[in-house]
Amino acid sequence: MNVRLIAVLVGLGQLLFSQAYADVDEVRVWQSPDKARLVLDLSGAHEHRIFQLTNPDRIVIDLTGAKLKASLNDLDLEDTNVIRIRSGVQNKTDLRLVVETKGSMDYRSFPLPPNESVKHHRLVVDMEPRSGGAAVSAPVVVKEVKSYSSTKRNIIIAIDAGHGGEDPGAIGYGKTKEKQVVLAIAKELERLLRNELGYTPFMVRTGDYYLGLRERSEKARKANADLFVSIHADSFKHPSAKGSSVFVLSDRGATSETARYLAQKENSSDLVGGVNISDREDHLALTLLDLSMTAKRGISVKIGDQILGEMGKISKLHKNQVEEAAFMVLKSPDVPALLVETGFISNPDEAKKLATRDYQNRMARAIFDGIKQYFSSFPPEGTLIAAQKNGPAPGRFIEYIVRRGDTLSELAVRNGLDINSLRAVNGLASDNLRVGQKLRIPNT
């Protein structure tokens, strides 16, 4: 046997050995309102076979020659569509994972090779309940409120906490994860908007799971949002970079090296999460899309200016004006959209602040104040804020004298009104009434 043949046989043996003994090092389950995602960390590239069985419903994954090194006992499966995951051995050498699910699932699986953020191979299985199956409830958006008339509605703000699940975003000083920081800020912004008369917040990401970039903006559109705000706390190659920023979509490219770098980094998160972001859209469709988006850019810049001014009161600004970059998440054709960089998590000083609840709340307040300032001046037509700004038309109110036994809630129900609106119309700080008190009742 010559030396060349021996080398070929050795190389083939090494290849077969590496494939046969690829291990499952870690197992994770992420649940979103729409689907569950199972992620297997693998010690190398590996082929797999997947199929579904019923009675009970389960998805079976076979990996030839693989070994399970992860523990399945510590998985947090509460509030997921997965009941449990168990393992077994097939043909004495093959690993079988059985995923018991709450009902029948539509599923798809795909491998993910290592990339800049994740250094190991992964196998991803997405499982979505079929029609009529079990599902984790999605947030409900209330579009209409009764106030001056039944046509007045709340202003809907879509809040997008960047990254999530398999995509931690930037990891800064003290191993602070961007996905955790921005979700905390987003939840505080949601609380502030929910407590503000005339606004309805819509959380694009409600927990620790991954969403594709196009999926995020599409959720905002389906919620009929008046504004889409994507919140981030990104990093830069130099730890000295610092300051808060606000970005709108650019049709001319990035306005600075930092903006260009950040846009490329955010766009790559779809690769981290396992979504193909190849551009397959028709050129004409893109042209029409760009025209539509351009019409919203002016509004986005004005709102961004207000938010930037408020953030400047609590943090250093990276730039004093709204910047432009090609962030894919902002490519919504009919919704004004902003991306807020709350700071550089790669900067030790800013990372320390961003990790604290106090600073997260202050940042959320700054974003909230900026949004409120803009919409107080330029409310969308048909909203409660617009009605309050323009004032009631003559004859829109009737006077009512409070009688013994009257309550504000009963008066609101009796007149087909929202109690918050009735309170606002009369400038009441509480629901307490006194006999003989004069109230204005909208004549709807």
Image: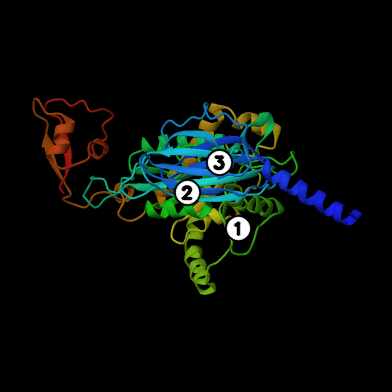
Q: Position of residue 226 (x, y in %)?
A: 40, 52
**Residue with the mark numbered 2:** 51
Query: Is mark 2 in CB contact (under 8 Å) with mark 1?
Result: no
Q: Position of residue 366 (x, y in %)?
A: 51, 38
**Spatial CA span between label 2 and label 1:** 40 Å
**Residue with the mark numbered 1:** 326
Q: Quadrant of the N terminus?
A: bottom right
Give me the residue at 67% from left, 43% from top.
Answer: 20
Give the vertical position of 137 relative to 323 (above or below): above
- Badge 2 local density, few (<14 within 10 Å), some, or many (20+)? few
What type is the residue that disc 3 sits on? Answer: Val
Circle 1 SS class: loop
**Residue with the mark numbered 3:** 39
**Horizontal side, residue 246 vs residue 19: left or right:** left
**Horizontal side, residue 14 vs residue 338: left or right:** right
Residue 339 appears in view: yes
Camera-side residue of 326 and 67: 67
Give me the residue at 48% from left, 38% from top.
Answer: 98
- Badge 1 local density, few (<14 within 10 Å), some, or many (20+)? many
Residue 417 placement: quadrant: top left
What type is the residue that disc 2 sits on? Answer: Phe
Camera-side residue of 431 and 187: 187
Along the polypeptide, which appears first: circle 3 or circle 2? 3
Give the vertical position of 221 relative to 31 (above or below): below
Along the polypeptide, which appears first: circle 1 or circle 3? 3
| Mark in front: 1 vs 3 | 3
Query: Is mark 3 in CB contact (under 8 Å) with mark 2?
Result: no
Residue 311 appears in view: no
Give the vertical position of 149 relative to 252 (above or below): above
**Spatial CA span between label 3 and label 2:** 16 Å
Residue 334 placement: quadrant: bottom left
